[in-house]
Image (spheres, coloured by chain):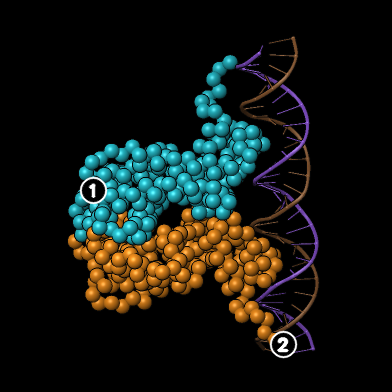
Chain colours: A cyan, B orange, C purple, D brown
Amino acid sequence: MADTALPAPGRQRVLDAAAERLVQQGYAATTLRQLAADAGIKAGSVYHHFASKEELFIAVFNRGIEVMVEAFDSVEVADPLERLGAHVRAHLGALFEHGSYTAAHVTAFFTAPPEVRAEVVPQRDEYEHRWNDLLADVFPDLPAGRRPLTRLLLFGSMNTTIEWFHLSGSLTLDDLAAIITSQFIDGIHASHLIRSAR
Amino acid sequence: MADTALPAPGRQRVLDAAAERLVQQGYAATTLRQLAADAGIKAGSVYHHFASKEELFIAVFNRGIEVMVEAFDSVEVADPLERLGAHVRAHLGALFEHGSYTAAHVTAFFTAPPEVRAEVVPQRDEYEHRWNDLLADVFPDLPAGRRPLTRLLLFGSMNTTIEWFHLSGSLTLDDLAAIITSQFIDGIHASHLIRSAR
DNA sequence: GAGATAACCTAACGGACGTTAGGGACTCTT
DNA sequence: AAGAGTCCCTAACGTCCGTTAGGTTATCTC
């Protein structure tokens, strides 16, 4: 009995397919029949692994946060400002280098129905809390009440890169992370000195 | 012969409903039957005003850009840095103060099918071009090749405010615009001096 | 007042959707 | 060898979707 050329188990293949479809189509337009076909099984068989479409996508969104948290926690840098840059780089890495789950989360979370979003909020909060603590650590002068807003502005810049950045371009992810970090800390006058356009 | 309590004509009411539904549900989850009900007509009657669902939403997305362009062009400020701040404020105004069309565009554009997006790209390009010119004017030292990236980072911060900012909160839109502008120009160390948390 | 046009209706079409019931094949445990 | 559990299948259900054909009413034009 030869190999079936489908290495990963069925449940995992469905999740992978869901993450990729989510990025390009959003929640409502991604159908179970598509995911089943992508994973090499039939639509009804999806229900062997997941109780419903909602539960399936909750798993995808949560995995997306897991990837971000793992990337965040893998950073070990002493110098505060350098540490911030490393975390920016890690977040972008989660978006572009560790599968589609984080990208799916960032692009499709707000297209999911409220019941699905509600199940994912606690994990999101945990990740946001890590960033608030980081900001408190790196910028002791930043008022505590200002941290969430500051974080949201930075997240806005980082997360929307999935709409236009491509790893295949001339700009590397390291470059992008350095530019975003510099822009965030010192503003436009400093950021464009990082690496001139060619 | 009393008034029908539905002032706007049918086509306009359908467009308004579409913009609002788009913000909360995205493209695929917004159905013509919903829009018809919102507008006080029947589903089939939508086809008197629009040839297809796609055409309807193209009109909504284009109107979203129109609102942004009108807000942009209404700015008349001499001082370069002040002008930038006024444009940031105008962009946020388009998002929050001039109906749901711009918000619908920003949140749902990437949830629309490719054929719909393709029809809207020229108008998007026009708006982006205005911003590139503005950046060139305000920051002559910024390399020309760097303008699109810089604009995308600023757009990322501004556009994702629709995911968390509410006019009813304690932070005003003027405050938010000032913070974003300061953060963009001078970075975090300057931005938090604009207005301390209370 | 005849004719055109606009704005809306009813009723239905084919198709796709999430979901379910019930069964077959295979592996592991005892 | 029996039983349980895992993984997947076929076939169908009720529902909703975008869209269309054909009809009604009211207004405007000449």
Of B193 and A192, which appears nearest the observer?
B193
Residues indicated by labels 1 and 2 sit on the same polypeptide chain: no
* Mark 1 and mark 2 residues within 8 Å of each other at the beta carbon: no
Of A130 and D8, which appears nearest the observer?
A130
Point out residue A100 in the picture as x, y percentages from the top left corner.
45, 41
Q: Chain of mark 2?
A: B
Point out residue B74 in the picture as x, y percentages from the top left corner.
36, 77
Which part of the image, by quadrant, shows the N terminus of chain B?
A: bottom right
Q: Quadrant of residue C1?
A: bottom right
Q: Residues within 10 Å of mark 2 (few under 14, many from 20)?
A: few
**Residue bearing mark 2:** B1
Q: Chain of mark 1?
A: A
Residue at screen point 47% across, 64% down = B103
In the image, taking residue C15 as reference, residue A25 lies left or right, namely: left
Q: Is residue A104 visible?
A: no
Q: Residues within 10 Å of mark 1 (few under 14, many from 20)?
A: some
Instruction: Report the amino acid beneath label 1.
Output: Leu
Q: Secondary structure at mark 1?
A: helix
Point out residue B4 in the picture as x, y percentages from the top left corner.
68, 81
Residue at screen point 23% across, 48% down = A81
Q: Quadrant of residue A73?
A: top left
Instruction: Report the amino acid beneath label 2.
Output: Met
Residue at screen point 40% across, 42% down = A68
Q: Secondary structure at mark 2?
A: loop
Point out residue B117 in the picture as x, y percentages from the top left corner.
48, 57
Q: Which mark is residue A81?
A: 1
